[in-house]
Amino acid sequence: MPYSKYQYVAKVAELQSISKAAAKLFISQPALTRIILNIETELGTTLFNRSVLPIQLTYAGKRYLEEARRIWEIDESFRRELQEISELKRGVLNIGINYAAGALWLPLILPEFHREYPAVTINLTQRSSMLFELDLLRGNIDLAFTTQTDASANLTYEYLSSARILAFIYRDHPILRGMNIDDNGVDNLLTLPPQLFDGQDFVLLHSADGFGHTVEKMMENLNIRPAHIMYVPDIVSCCRLAAAGMGITFATPYATHYTLPGAVPVIAGVSTSVAYEHNAIAFSKKKELNTIEKRFISLARAKISDSPSLHPLTGAQWQQLRDEKHEMNGSWI
């Protein structure tokens, strides 16, 4: 149905007068009358009750207007989308990323996105999740990968994934004495009571980082009081320093990808708690996403959920890393 027909019927229904509607539509009254009659003939039903003044829609007229409005809105939305695609073939997408997004996810997302939108310039800003809100609200960035525990009332979150938070522990750590750790891995976790962690040294992300904030709250809930905390800027450093005996860290199974051969930590869950990191893409609640931004989000969701390379290392892969000699010649750094 050409959407102009909807406009003619809608205007007559709104003003309850063919003559008034004709004036608003800048056509003559006889011309508008013919248009309405032609629509009624085409449909085989009467849209207006002309026996009363002002004229009223019949039941069929009301149903026609409801469905015609829906079709017209779909048509308009589709036209806007096509226009956005045309206009945004050349544009800029500013994205805030955390370490996991930059190291693990973007190498899978961006190549396909670039093939679809080769002329769109991507600008990446890396910092902790909790620092992105102001940039999003000011429009400095369009989208941001985030792992914040406490959602902001000013932002909308598009969920990507969740991952359990686990302890990564030096293999010769005293709390592991007498425990069988030979077959340890993500698919064969140790389970330790929170009391064992109390009073130990830790290597952690600062609470200003989204994941660091999540871990801090988890430790508070479990009454884990560290003897000493070494704060480091990224999760890779956390995991590798923990494996080297500098302290216990908490990370998700994604962190198995950061492990160095010959320096493999023990992975453990906490017996009284199962805590999760939730990953999302955030944007301002006042922002209306364009087609390019919607496509980026849908592509990110698909790649993160479907890519085997983002799954934790299997037990066999973990064992292989344990068995390989760690060469300290800088080639792994």
Image: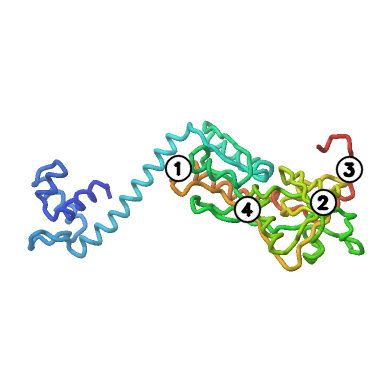
Residue 321 appears in the picture as rendered: no
Element carrying mark 3: loop
State which tag comes first along the sequence, 1 or 2: 2
State which tag comes first along the sequence, 2 or 4: 2
- 9 and 39: which one is in front? 9
Q: Which residue is mark 1?
A: 290
State which tag comes first along the sequence, 4 or 1: 1
Amino acid type indicated by mark 4:
Ser
State which tag comes first along the sequence, 3 or 2: 2
Label 1 neighbour load within 10 Å: few <14, some 14-19, many 20+:
few
Q: Which residue is mark 3?
A: 326
Amino acid type indicated by mark 3:
His
Label 2 neighbour load within 10 Å: few <14, some 14-19, many 20+:
many
Tell me, yes or no, whether the two marked residues, 3 and 2, touch with CB atoms within 8 Å: no
Q: Residue at x 84, y 59 (%)?
A: 184
Q: Nearer the viewer, mark 2 or mark 4?
A: 2
Q: CA distance from mark 3 to mark 1?
A: 48 Å
Q: CA distance from mark 3 to mark 4?
A: 32 Å
Element carrying mark 4: helix
Quadrant of the rendering where the C terminus is positioned: top right
Tell me, yes or no, whether the two marked residues, 3 and 4, touch with CB atoms within 8 Å: no
Element carrying mark 1: loop
State which tag comes first along the sequence, 3 or 1: 1
Q: Residue at x 52, y 33 (%)?
A: 120
Q: CA distance from mark 3 to mark 2?
A: 19 Å
* Residue 266 picture quarter: bottom right
Amino acid type indicated by mark 2:
Gly
Q: Which residue is mark 2?
A: 247
State which tag comes first along the sequence, 3 or 4: 4
Q: Which residue is mark 4?
A: 305
Q: Nearer the viewer, mark 3 or mark 2?
A: 2
